[in-house]
Image: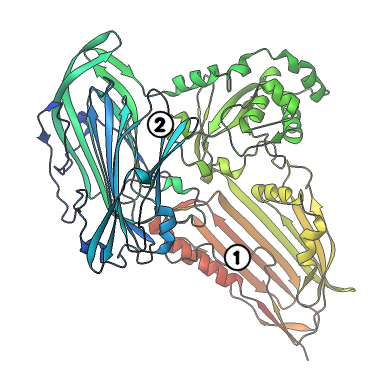
Amino acid sequence: MKPSIFLHPLLYVLCLLLTTSLRAHQTDTTGKRPDSIQHTPGVIGSQHPMNRPDMDFGAVTPETLAPTAYAIDSSADAVILFDHGVVNFDPSDYDHRFSYILERHVMIRVLHKNAINRLATFTLSLPKGSDAPYLETFKGATYNLDNSRLVTTRLDKSSLFKDEEKNFMQLKIAFPDLKTGSVIEYSYRIIYAGAYIPPWTFQGIYPELWSEYDITVPTLYDYAVKLQGYQKYVIDSSILSTASFPVSFGALSGLWSGQTVRRIWALQDVPALERAEPYTTTLKNHLSKIEFQLSAVHFDGYNKTYRTTWTELVNELMKRDDFGAPLLDHNHWIDEELKKITTGETTSLGSLHKIYAYIRDNFACVTADGLYMSQPLKKVWENKKGNVADLNLLLTMCCRHLGLDASPVILSTRSNGMAVDDYPLLSDYNYVITRVWVDGTAYLLDATRPALGFDRLPETCYNGWARAIDDRQEQIPLQSDSVTERRNTLVVLANTDSGYTGTYTHHAGIFESFDLRNRMRSEKPEDFFEAMRKGPYNRQLGDHGFDSLAFPDVPVTWYYSMHYGFTTQTVYFNPIFHERFIASPFNSPVRHYPVEMPYCIDNSSSLTMEIPKGYKVDQLPKSQRLMLADGKGAFEYIIQSDGKTIEFHTHLQITKTYYNLDEYKGLRDFFSAIVNKEKEVIVFKKIN
C-alpha cells in the first residue's frame, strides 16, 4: 500500500480550489444542480468507474443481503456499502443568505452481533446559534430477509430523539429491527449558512466499499484544500460550469457571474482505520479525509483574504487576554518574588536557571496540554497550579520581567497530530512552551514537568515545526530526527579473592532519565532493584543505587555490584544484561501505517570479563554487523577472547525516525535479526 498523496512526515497536500489551478482531471457526470442557479457546464474530462454502486435511496434487493463476508475484510463486524456526500451551494437560502447544502447518503451491512450496539443508534451532533447548521430532512430504513423475502422497516417519528445541551443539539436515530445480517440506510440534508464547506472522512472503524464526496463551489470563493491519506482516488475529477446570482457584501451588492468548480473524489475498498501500531504517533495523521478552509472572496473589485498569515495569527494571539496580553502588562506584583528567587545571581543564564527551576518544582500542572490560559497569571502564582499554558506563559512573563528575551512558542504534540505550518490555523495547535535567548543561545523550556531538565522537552513535543509567537515569528524545528536518545552500559567482571564479582553501570538517556524520575516518585529504589537481586548461577546483588536522580538537569545513572557462584558443569552466559530486545517491536508481518519513532537511537553496551576461574570458553558467538538498506540504521555485535578475558561490545544506531510502508519489511528484518543475535550466549565448560 503506497501513499497517493504524501509529503513527509504528514500525509497531506494543500491546494487552492480555483479553476486556474485545476489540472485536466477526469470527471463523473452524476449528481444534481440547484434549480435556482443558471449554469452552463464545461467538462474537463470524464471517468466512469465500472463498479460504482447504485446509490439511489431504497436500491436494496435480496442480493444486497446475501454475502456473509466481504473480500475487503472477511472478519469485519460491519461493512459500509457506500457513503456518498454531495455539497451544492444556494445563493439565497430560506434566510436569504449564501449557504452550502450537504446531502449525505449511507448504507451499511451488519455482519456480526458485535456491531449491533454501535450501529443501532445513529447520533448527529449540531452546534446551536444563529449561524448554526440546520438539519432540514432525515430518513432511514432497516432491511432484513424473511424466507428470502425482503422486509423493509422505515424510520418514523418514534425512532427520532432530540437531546438538547447548552451548545449542541444531538439528534439520535434508533434503527428498528436491527439484527445480524441487516442492512441499514439513512440520508439527511444539512444547510450550512455562509461559506463553510463541511469536511469529509473516507475512513472509519469499518471497511468501506465506496466513499465519494462531490462538491460544487463558485469561484467567488477561494478555498485551501487539505487532502490526507494513502489510497489512490478512483475518481479525482473536475467539471467547470458558469453561474450567476445576486450577492451582497456589506454595502456592496450586485449580480455575480462566473465559473463554478465541481470537484469529485471517490475511494474504493477503503480499509477500516486500524488500531494504533507500535511507533505510531496518532491515527489522526493517517486518516483518509478532505478539509476545506476559506481563503479569499473576489467580487467586482472587492477582494478579501481570509487565509491567516503568521503575522496576523501572532497579532491575534498577543492581543488575547488568555495568551499574550498579560505578557505586555507591567506585572509589578511579581517584583519582590523574583528578587527572592534570583538572589545572588549575577548572570542572565543563572537567573533563568533559577526561575525555571522554581516554577517547575513548585507548581502543579493539571492538564496534559493547553494553548490558552485558564486563569490570570497572578492567580496561577497564588494557586501554584494551572494548565500547560498557565505555567509556561507564567515562565515567559517572569523571564521578560527579568529583562530576558523570552517568547511563547506554540506547537502540536504527537498525540494531537501534525500541524500544517504553511497554512496556520490555531485549531492545529495544543501546546505552548517558552523560548529564551541568552548570549546568542536559544533555550527551549517546559516548566510543566518536575522530572524535566533545563533546555529539555518531553518527547511528545517533537512533532514537526513549532512557531515563535513574537515579532520574528520564526519556525523552530522540532522534528523527531533532531533529537537522539543516547544510552550506555558498562559491565566489568573479574576473578577476585571473594569469588567472581563485578559491577554494572547504566547511563540513561534524556527520555529514559525523565521516565525513571517519574517512576521513582512513586516507587522505592529497593523495589526497582528487587528484580535484579537474584539472577542465574547464584548471582547476588551487592551495593546498588542511583546517581543524579534528584537533579533533573543531569542524566540518571544506576548501578550495582554483583557476585556469581558458578558450580554447574556448563554455564550459558548472555553478555547483555538488561538492554537486549526480548521481542521485536515490529513482529507483525503486515504494517498499516508508517513507523514514526519518537527520536533517533544511539545505544551502546560494553562488557569486559575474565573467564571464570575453573572454566574455559567452549563456544563464543560470532561477531556480526547489520545495516539498513538506506544506511540510516546499523547494529554491531563484536566479541573476542584471548583465552583469559572476553571483550564484548554492541552498538545500535538509528539516525532516521520515519519509515514508510515500503521500508517496513527491511526494518522488521533488521530488528528480528537483532533479537535473534542478542539471544546468543557464551558457553563455558568446567575444566576437569
Could you say whether the residue bearing mark 2 is in a helix, strand or loop? loop
Q: Which residue lies furthest to the front in this view?
A: 158
Name the image quarter holding the C terminus. Answer: bottom right
Binning the other alpha carbons within 10 Å of mark 2 as few (below 14), some (14 to 19) or many (20 upward) gives: few
Q: Residue furthest bottom?
A: 688
Please give the name of the residue rendered at 56% of the width and 69% of the height, measured from the top-left corner.
675
Picture quadrant of residue 529? bottom right
Residue nearest the observer in this picture, 670 or 469:
469
Three-letter code, disc 2: Asp
Q: Residue furthest top?
A: 251
Kind of residue at disc 1 = Phe
Q: Mark 2 points at which residue?
A: 422
* Image point (21%, 51%), residue name: 58
In the image, 497 versus 482, the foreground residue is: 482
Q: Is residue 556 above or below residue 339?
A: below
Sequence order check, earlier mark of 1 and 2:
2
Pointer 1 residue: 581
Residue 270, can we see it? no
Residue 292 appears at what percent x and percent y?
A: 33, 33
Question: SS at mark 1?
Answer: loop
Side (left or right) of 438 relative to 589: right
Residue 89 placed where, x, y %?
Answer: 23, 29
Look at the picture and state if 589 lies above or below 354.
below
Viewed as shown, does residue 574 lie left or right of 204? Answer: right
Q: Is residue 127 above or below residue 600?
A: above
